[in-house]
Image (cartoon, rainbow, N blue to C red):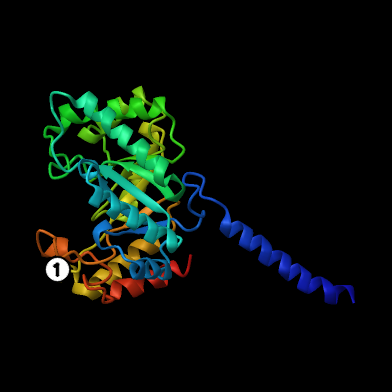
Amino acid sequence: MKSAHLNPLSALTLLLLAATGQSQANELFPALPANKTIGVQVKVQTFSAADAERVKATGFSFVRFGVWTDSLPSAAYQKQISDAFAVARAAGLPVLMTLRATKPLPANDLANAGVAYANALTSLAATYGSQLVAIELWNEPDLGTYWPTGNFDTTFVPFMSAACKTLQDKPQTVPVIGFGFARPPTAGSASTVALNRIVSEYPKCLNAVSYHPYGMSGTQISNAQAFIQQNFHLPGVISEWGISALPSNGGTEGQASKISAFVADIKTRNIALTSIYEWKNSDTGSNDREKNFGLLTSDGQPKPAETAVKTQLSQQ
């Protein structure tokens, strides 16, 4: 009789233990469960409630979107941001917010620009902090397109050092990552030089180093992770990776195959956060490659990549 009662109880205990393990927080990003570390990028301007529900159903655990500091004075833009956060909140999707400017910073006043940037971050964190996975400082500053101030080697460190000093003097309750490099730091690279200076002077500014490993193999990603940990004593995270559905990549089927392989591989590498680029195709992209990274078409029709990702994420 005891064994007849014990077996169901044992099964229930195991189920409860399993549920507890699955709900344990990610140590680096408490807004995420430990085993749900993959999100997807969306555009603030077009992010709808239907998108959010579908993102959630696909198995993504967060969304990433950008906020532009030079647009924040606009009430209409502030409403776009507020609406995007509301859509994410309704679907139970925390947000990785990447913060940058789209216009050149004043080259003769980079320190004050850095302070203003940090203050904008602090204000946004106060408003949306409960929804944030993390705040990312900038996006691909090692590319001129996203660092319009020019001469990364001489202008980035003064700006970001001032921002980091301000943030370190006012400790943030939300994890902060940076700097969304287009390529991971390597020995002697400009990004490594910049990180060494900023991290050594402001060791409490960043919780992780973020980068975008487009075109890299799993082994190369592991090597990048090890380099970041060894040189900056911080974990590396992937704030952007994707594959365009170009004919040279095998079209939509090739995109699906490559993204499936990437997600399968990344799940084995103990990376605390990975964001896929992007949810929908972008009609505003500057060329065919930029227009076709989406898991869906721009009007929301599914591509094979969405099913491929959903299959992989259902196995987490």
User: What residue sits right under mark 1 in the picture?
Assistant: 248
Looking at the rendered structure, the kind of residue marked 1 is Ser
Question: Horizontal and vertical percent for residue 239?
Answer: 32, 50
How dense is the environment of label 1, judged by Cα within 10 Å: few (below 14), some, or many (20 and up)? few
Question: Horizontal and vertical percent for residue 299?
Answer: 22, 73
- Name the residue: 51% across, 49% down: 26
- Name the residue: 26% across, 38% down: 186
Tell which of 276 and 119 is nearer to you.
119
Indicate left or right for 2 with 22 as reference. Answer: right
Tell which of 120 and 14 is nearer to you.
120
Indicate left or right for 40 with 34 as reference. Answer: left
Quadrant in which residue 143 is drawn? top left
Question: Horizontal and vertical percent for residue 80?
Answer: 28, 55
On screen, 115 above or below 14? above
Tell which of 273 and 300 is nearer to you.
300
- Name the residue: 25% across, 69% down: 255
Question: Horizontal and vertical percent for residue 157?
Answer: 23, 28
Indicate left or right for 62 with 99 as reference. Answer: right
Q: Secondary structure at mark 1?
A: helix
Indicate left or right for 37 with 306 as reference. Answer: right
Q: Is residue 24 visible?
A: yes
